[in-house]
């Protein structure tokens, strides 16, 4: 870790207050993302409307959300609490909710790749579990969560496989490696090659939901600045060693990370969403009755980022947003941590 207060950038940034309604809510403002029970209820309602209330294992759905809530809080034997503000419980709940909406939209569109009820639930649970690889086992107490960044997708896939094998969905445990579709360093085609159509659909939904629920977050820029940059520094993601052995700095500071946002969207996120993942995000509009709040919010974030960068208007960037992580590493300057 370089320095004791990563991500703050130069002094003198006046935090712009953000509306309370944007704090720890989904993109619609209707679902509280600091409440696993509420998100489970929202997902249950979506799947019940999509398939019928008796068509999927509702008890397993609610039990899984409650268990993941305890897991991130450090209340499950063998695991330490989540110590990260960006890859927190809120993000996992947000991704699961987004996948449920894609599952519903796909069925409304009567697409050939629409998922059967059992697989729709599998898709939601894989989204819920996709970042469990960041959670440390008790024997890993000397590590910080971000230090697991390079292996967290594979760890999460193994974790999800083990979890599913202990449930009535055990026969679908072999779908857990589809979590690798969320790995930015891996081409989705290598994950989805040779898979059956339902598995391809699940993989595309996982990868898409993971991206859009981040970039559509009302406080995405603040989360990058105050939360993601420190995680990158701790995990070494702000730098790389070149083939000739030189150390290359990828992000000089938190401002530089925010400044990379437009390029990240155009050259990484957008090609994956529109091409590699088959533009499955088009099904959001059907779920929402014709509008796509994820796309709208992403455009708003990119426009606000442009205003900040073009006019050097860092005063438009708000202060540290809250996180669902209660056991937050003291290295993160995050007022309001522990909001539940």
Image (tube, rainbow, N blue to C red):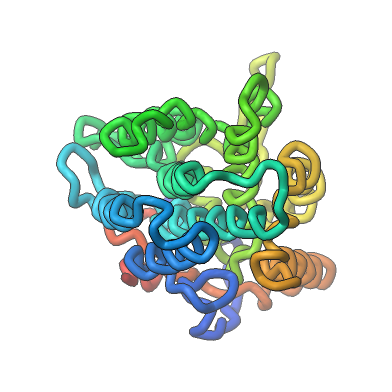
Where is residue 20? Give x, y as percent: 49, 84
User: In the displayed structure, would residue 117 be above or below residue 316?
Assistant: above
Question: Which residue, as the protein is rendered here, is positioned at the far left?
Answer: 77
Q: Nearer the viewer, residue 177 or 145?
A: 177
Q: Residue at x 69, y 15 (%)?
A: 243
State the residue in front, 81 or 125: 125
Figure quadrant of the C terminus: bottom left
Residue placed farthest to the top in the image?
244
Question: Where residue 284 sits: x, y (%)?
Answer: 68, 61
| Percent x, y of residue 69 | 29, 56
Q: Is residue 68 left or right of residue 98?
A: left
For residue 269, say whether it is visible: no
In the rendered view, would you say 252 is above or below 186? below
Q: Is residue 324 left or right of residue 211?
A: left
Residue 261 falls in which quadrant of the image? bottom right
Residue 289 in view (yes/no): yes
- State left or right for residue 158 relative to residue 196: left
Residue lying at 67% horizontally and 42% vertically, measured from the top left? 113
Q: Residue furthest right?
A: 310
Quarter the N terminus occupies:
top left
Q: Residue at x 46, y 63 (%)?
A: 48
Q: Position of residue 29 (x, y in %)?
A: 54, 78
Please state which of residues 189 and 297 is positioned toward the viewer in this rendering. 189
Asked if residue 65 lies left or right of residue 47, the reply is left
């Amino acid at each position: 870790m370089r320095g004791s207060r990563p991500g703050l950038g130069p002094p003198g940034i006046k935090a712009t207050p953000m509306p309370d309604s944007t704090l720890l809510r989904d993109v619609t403002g209707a679902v509280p993302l600091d409440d696993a029970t509420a998100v489970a209820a929202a997902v249950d309602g979506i799947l019940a409307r999509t398939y019928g209330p008796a068509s999927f294992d509702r008890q397993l759905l609610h039990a899984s959300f409650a268990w993941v809530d305890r897991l991130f809080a450090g209340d499950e034997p063998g695991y330490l609490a989540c110590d990260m503000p960006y890859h927190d419980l809120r993000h996992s709940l947000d991704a699961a909710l987004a996948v449920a909406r894609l599952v519903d939209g796909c069925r409304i569109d009567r697409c050939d790749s629409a998922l059967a009820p059992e697989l729709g639930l599998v898709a939601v649970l894989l989204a819920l579990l996709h970042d469990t690889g960041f959670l440390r086992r008790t024997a890993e107490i000397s590590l910080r969560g971000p230090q697991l960044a390079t292996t967290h997708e594979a760890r999460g896939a193994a974790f999800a496989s083990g979890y599913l094998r202990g449930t009535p969905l055990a026969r679908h445990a072999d779908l857990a490696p589809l979590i690798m579709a969320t790995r930015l360093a891996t081409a989705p085609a290598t994950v989805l090659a040779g898979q059956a159509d339902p598995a391809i659909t699940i993989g595309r939904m996982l990868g898409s939901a993971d991206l859009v629920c981040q970039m559509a977050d009302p406080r995405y820029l603040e989360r990058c600045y105050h939360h993601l940059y420190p995680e990158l520094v701790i995990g070494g993601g702000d730098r790389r060693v070149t083939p000739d052995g030189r150390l290359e700095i990828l992000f000089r500071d938190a401002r530089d990370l925010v400044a990379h946002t437009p390029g990240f969207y155009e050259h990484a996120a957008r090609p994956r969403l529109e091409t590699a993942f088959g533009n499955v995000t088009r099904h959001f509009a059907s779920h929402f009755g014709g509008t796509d709040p994820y796309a709208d919010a992403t455009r708003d974030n990119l426009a606000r980022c442009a205003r900040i960068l073009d006019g050097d208007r860092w005063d438009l960037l708000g202060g540290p947003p809250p996180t669902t992580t209660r056991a937050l590493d003291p290295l993160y300057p995050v007022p309001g941590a522990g909001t539940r």
